[in-house]
């Protein structure tokens, strides 16, 4: 891919490539899923900025609409070839030449969010719609490609 790195072989390879990749960890605007086993928390800088911007836009939108604050949950980021091989055994959506190999792609769940304010409940449908609107806006601004993955319950987002 034009903005990505050469496919990462395994976790050690990802560690060696820190000049091309940046670490993405939970922050005020998004949460990296603790159960994420098939990914390494790295992205190319452009994708990391996009993730941050989407998370911040979601947060800002909730504040504007006076909705209890939630963070989006990132369920997948960079995958090594070894990760993809393992994943393909149990996930029919996983392709051999996954966009996740290049550090340009991440998945954000639309089925779960990290609630920061329990003062009142908001429906999952409302949160999903707000996130969908934000992802759509970033796509319309030519900042990303986005796929709504029904089976996996996530938005699959690749930086442009």
Image: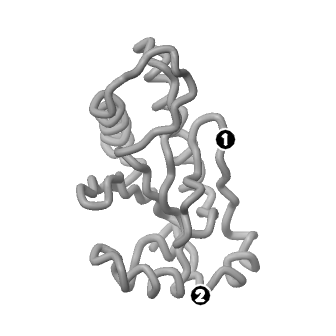
- Asked whether 117 or 138 is in front, the reply is 117
Residue 142, percent from left and from top: 37, 47
Q: Secondary structure at mark 2?
A: loop
Residue 159's tag is none
Q: Is residue 127 left or right of residue 117?
A: left
What is the quadrant of residue 123 in the picture?
Answer: top left
Quadrant into which the N terminus falls: bottom left
Considering every residue shown, the one lying at the far left of the view is: 150
Residue 32, percent from left and from top: 58, 52
| Residue pictured at 68% horizontal, 69% vertical | 20
Residue 126, percent from left and from top: 30, 28
For disc 1, the marked residue is 27
Q: How is the image coloured?
A: one colour
For disc 2, the marked residue is 9
| Residue pictured at 66% horizontal, 41% vertical | 27
| Residue pictured at 51% horizontal, 73% vertical | 102
């Amino acid at each position: 891919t034009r903005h990505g790195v050469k496919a990462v072989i395994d976790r050690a390879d990802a560690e060696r490539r820190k000049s091309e990749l940046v670490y993405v960890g939970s922050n005020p605007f998004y949460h990296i899923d603790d159960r994420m086993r098939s990914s390494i928390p790295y992205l190319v800088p452009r994708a990391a900025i996009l993730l941050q911007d989407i998370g911040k836009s979601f947060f800002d939108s909730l504040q504007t609409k006076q909705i209890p604050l939630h963070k989006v949950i990132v369920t997948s980021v960079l995958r090594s070839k070894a990760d993809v091989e393992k994943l393909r055994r149990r996930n029919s959506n996983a392709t051999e030449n996954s966009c996740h190999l290049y550090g340009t792609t991440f998945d954000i769940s639309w089925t779960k969010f990290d609630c920061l304010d329990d003062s009142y409940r908001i429906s999952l449908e409302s949160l999903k719609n707000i996130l969908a609107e934000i992802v759509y806006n970033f796509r319309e601004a030519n900042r990303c490609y986005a796929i709504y993955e029904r089976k996996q319950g996530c938005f699959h987002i690749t930086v442009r």
